[in-house]
Amino acid sequence: MATILVVDDAAFMRMRMSKILTEAGYEVIQAENGLEAVEKYQAAKPDAVLMDITMPEMDGLTALKEIRKVDPNAKVAMVTALGQQQIVLEAVKSGAKDFLVKPAEADRVLAAVSKLCN
């Protein structure tokens, strides 16, 4: 089964998404900011990434660009709060394949990951 990197500075969001994904049979790696996400991406080469946009250390948009420098084929979906449409557009232009609005329902999380991994 695919390995998914879940990136969010909020521990409860990482835990919630990780639970949804592990229950569906995915292997999950977690990172709490963009800097850690880039490091873990390089170390583990996950099949897909679910990345929060607003985080300390390095935001999700910058992390997306850094990951895409390392791996131009990286499959990343951005996870956003409502009202961040402008950032989402920039993320898509920067190579994000999908986006989810928080709090994402389990079926939406699984649909996004399935789309990324296929």
Image (cartoon, helix red, strand yellow):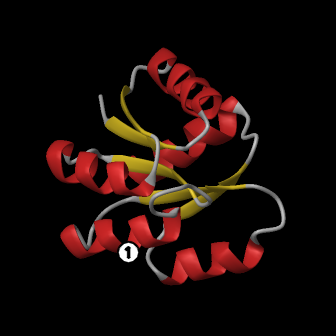
Q: Secondary structure at mark 1?
A: helix
Residue, far front: 57
Q: Is residue 114 left or right of residue 5?
A: right
Closer to the camera in the image, 84 or 10: 10
Q: Is residue 88 above or below residue 14?
A: below
Q: Is residue 75 left or right of residue 13?
A: left
Give coordinates of residue 57: x percent, y percent: 46, 58
Residue, far right: 83
Identified at 27% across, 68% down, the residue is 73
Quadrant position of residue 20: top right
Closer to the camera in the image, 33 or 27: 33
Closer to the camera in the image, 13 or 24: 13
Q: For the residue carrying disc 1, how many other residues have a C-alpha within 10 Å: few (<14), some (14-19), or many (20+)?
A: some
Identified at 26% across, 45% down, the residue is 40
Quadrant position of residue 99: bottom right
Does the image show residue 118? no
